[in-house]
Amino acid sequence: MKKNILIFGLIMGAVLSANMVYTVNLCYHSGDFKGNDILGYAAMIVIFSFIFIAVRNYRNKFNGGLIGFGSAFKMGALIAFIAATCYVLTWLFYYYLFVPDFLDKYIPYVLQNAAEKGASASEVAKQTADMDKFKEMYKNPLFVILVTYAEVLPVGLIVALLSALILKKKTKDPEMAVP
């Protein structure tokens, strides 16, 4: 099980990281952040769907076709954690080495978007203060790590939970038994 977790976690982490670098780079250089959140989370769901494949692979090839909910969820959660850790480490290196002014480009977009959607002057002022506070907190690497985990890990845990619910199998089907 450990080997399966590690292999799938690292593969998914590499794909998540590559996707993140590509989309951040695209937005950073174009200045257009529109649709990035939807595209980013959709890609995360697709990538994390490999948790289902990993658990099913383990259940069918290495565990005699049986797996309990707890084991399936534990396996999926560990895969999600490894993939999320790869994502977090990649973001730390990418942010600090290549796009340290990312928030300087992103915050004006958020504020302009709020104004275009009809936010009042007081709402824009409050959002400006909130974004300034966030930017100040983002100077702390521990905060960056926590925010980045919060961005990706819940998606992986939800997929792990759904996979465990779908794939749990405590007994073999008598029809599928080979005489």
Image (tube, rainbow, N blue to C red):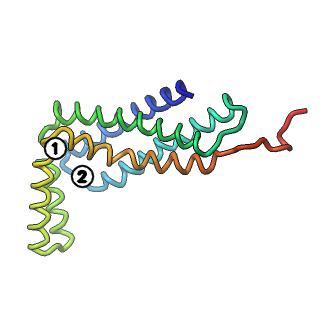
Can residue 18 be seen?
Answer: no
x, y (%) of residue 52?
A: 56, 42
Q: Amino acid at mark 2?
A: Phe
* 71 to the left or right of 85: right
Mark whose residue sits in front, 1 or 2: 1
Residue on which the image places disc 2: 33
Residue under the point 9% across and 61% down: 129
Residue on which the image places disc 1: 102
* 8 to the left or right of 29: right
Residue 171, numbered label: none
Q: Are marks 1 and 2 in contact (CB under 8 Å)?
A: no
Residue under the point 46% across and 32% down: 9
x, y (%) of residue 64?
A: 72, 32
Above or below: residue 166 compared with residue 117: above
Q: CA distance from mark 1 to mark 2?
A: 11 Å
Can residue 24 be seen?
Answer: yes
Count of marks placed on residues: 2
Quadrant of res 73: top right
Residue under the point 25% across and 40% down: 145
* Element carrying mark 1: helix
